[in-house]
Image: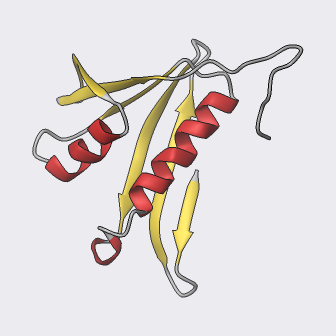
Amino acid sequence: MAVYDDGDRIVGVAAIAFAESGNAELFHLALDLSEQGRGLAGRALELLVDRAVSRGGTRLELSVHPNNVVAQLLYRRAGFEPTGGERDGEPVWSLPLPTRATGPGSMLES
């Protein structure tokens, strides 16, 4: 979970959950309306993807309201694609995650 603040107040939150299957689910990404358009959601999403990869995740999934066009644009730019499935009446989107290189000669960020 990530919490963003501007020193005086919380302006955004983001969280993912991990399953034993290797999949991760983005179950919350929200910003105060006054903070939207500054790139915070994109940076939060990058951090969560990095976290999922570092945990060995193979796929990151989320559901997004069909009318939330702004979020859909963010997710599409990040590489997510609709799966055709639904969760709680909302379309499910998925992002295949890169595999972590391990072994001699591999470079991993910590």
Which residue is at 22% across, 45% downward? Answer: 73
Q: Vertical placement of 41 versus 60: above or below?
A: below
32 up-or-down from 108: above or below: below
Q: Is residue 2 left or right of residue 93?
A: right
Viewer-closest of 62 and 82: 82
Q: Nearer the viewer, residue 53 or 25?
A: 53
Q: Colour scheme of this structure image?
A: secondary structure
Q: Is residue 29 left or right of residue 33?
A: right
On the image, the x and y values in percent for residue 23 come to: 52, 20
- What's the residue at 31%, 41% (across, down)? 77
Residue 4 percent location from the top left of the image: 53, 68
Q: Most extreme residue toward the right, as rendered?
A: 104
Q: Is residue 44 left or right of residue 95?
A: right
Q: Residue furthest front?
A: 105
Q: Residue at coordinates 68% horizontally, 21% vertically from top-left?
A: 100
Residue 35 figure quarter:
bottom left
How many discs appear? Answer: 0
Residue at the (46%, 47%) spot, across then down:
45
Above/below status of 21 relative to 74? above
Residue 1's x, y, as percent?
A: 58, 50
> In the image, is 39 to the left or to the right of 5?
left
The quadrant in which residue 8 appears is bottom right
Q: Quadrant of the C terminus?
A: top right
